[in-house]
Image: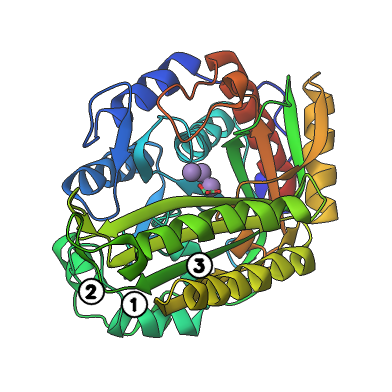
Amino acid sequence: NPFDGSSSLPTSLSVDGDSLQRQIDELSTFSDTPAPSVTRILYSEKDVLARRYIKNLMGLSGLSVREDAVGNIFGRWDGYEPGLPAVATGSHIDAIPYSGKYDGVVGVLGAIEAINVLKRSGFRPKRSLEVILFTSEEPTRFGISCLGSRLLAGSVTLAEALKKTTVDGQNISFVDAARLAGYMKDEDDLSSVFLNSGSYSAFLELHIEQGPILEAEGIVTAIAAPASIKVDFEGNGGHAGAVLMPNRNDAGLAAAELALAVEKHVLDSGSIDTVGTVGILELHPGAINSIPSKPHLEIDTRDIDEKRRNEVIEKIHQSAVAIATKRSVSLSEFRIVNQDPPALSDKSIIKAMEDATKELNLTHKSMISRAYHDSLFMARISPMGMLFIPCYKGYSHKPEEYSSSQDIANGVKVLALTLAKLSLY
Ligand code: GLV
Ligand code: MN
Ligand code: MN
Ligand code: MN
């Protein structure tokens, strides 16, 4: 009798790898760039269609679906003790420009399949199981990473910024973009998105590794600490032929120098774990015969050691000031958009994943996640764990991203069994 609390773990777990692969392929067609690349930007038409696709699958799996004001989507399978905090799992389906079809997607479609696996096995969860699709893990549109999970974790600063100042590159406000996609309807109180700490007894995310280490399962022990910075310089600009070299203050060169300074400071940290990237460098007015007057840079820097990363940020700031002085341009903006601390996985969730892996005759490696994930923020309100599966050559954030159906199926099995275990705790 499942109601007496004596429910047992499932014994046979069968993943429908073909359906899952078909779903991954189908979802990848909701893209604004041609296959094999995928581009799915927050609240775009393609994003809305992809969300509909996921909600439909959740419904087919018998989950009750709820969406919050920013479009985080929750699909719940009620346990036989529905009053207990649920066990949640999920990831994101937004995709940066010209990326691949597995990043995030495996953790959403795989989570729904894990529920199907458990249902087919006859398992009855004690704690409810919940699949979450997080809104905008990628910072592409509004420059804010993990927008949905950051809000779920209760970021008041973000809620304020989203209501008042956040615009995209086309100057469309977050609120307008959300409304156009069917969200933020009569709701501008974003605190409705916040979840109480303790809402979940565990949160688990399945994700491709995005690195080259794994041959089998990866159990994440910690997530590195990411930060991002926006920088603007301003110079006089002018005619590329008429303004002589001694009379210029070329702000584009200040930006170029800062990009090199980022690399230098990162390398000077002396640790292989410190990384820094200038992924955006735009020159205004962007004409071959005009001296750049307004460059814009966006800098991403990360480390597993928060203090060391913060020292790099400080050095980048000092360089920006010094370069501006030297080149007689102004540093019109140096804004740290986010400077997040790292997160540790929960010991008992790690143990549950290790046990599940062993019981399924799979091997695993313990590792840190150098990429960030919604789990970084879910860790603020719930015990957290992450499961990585191998991906081809570690390729990610590009169209060549690939994980085999077998590796995905193994990941889904471990996820399913771990969810089952955590649901019975
Ligand atoms: C998110 O995709 C990241 O950049 O780690
Ligand atoms: Mn990504
Ligand atoms: Mn991802
Ligand atoms: Mn990520």
Q: Is residue 78 left or right of residue 342?
A: left
Point out the image quarter for the C terminus: bottom right
In terms of image quadrants, where is residue 86? bottom right
Residue 160, position in %: x, y?
38, 85
The amino acid type found where label 1 is placed reads: Leu
In which quarter of the view is residue 368 placed? top right
- The CA span between labels 3 and 1 is 18 Å
- The residue beneath circle 3 is 229
Q: Is the Cβ of the residue at disc 1 closer than 8 Å to that at disc 2? A: yes
Residue linked to disc 1: 162
Please, what secondary structure does the residue beneath circle 3 have? Answer: strand
- The residue nearer to you, when weighing 11 against 278, is 278
Residues packed near mark 3 inside 10 Å, few (<14), some (14 to 19) or many (20 plus)? many
Q: Residue at x 67, y 45 (%)?
A: 2
* Left/right of residue 176 with respect to residue 401 in the rendered view: left
Q: Residue at x 30, y 81 (%)?
A: 165
Which is in the foreground here, disc 3 or disc 1? 3
Q: Which residue is mark 2?
A: 175
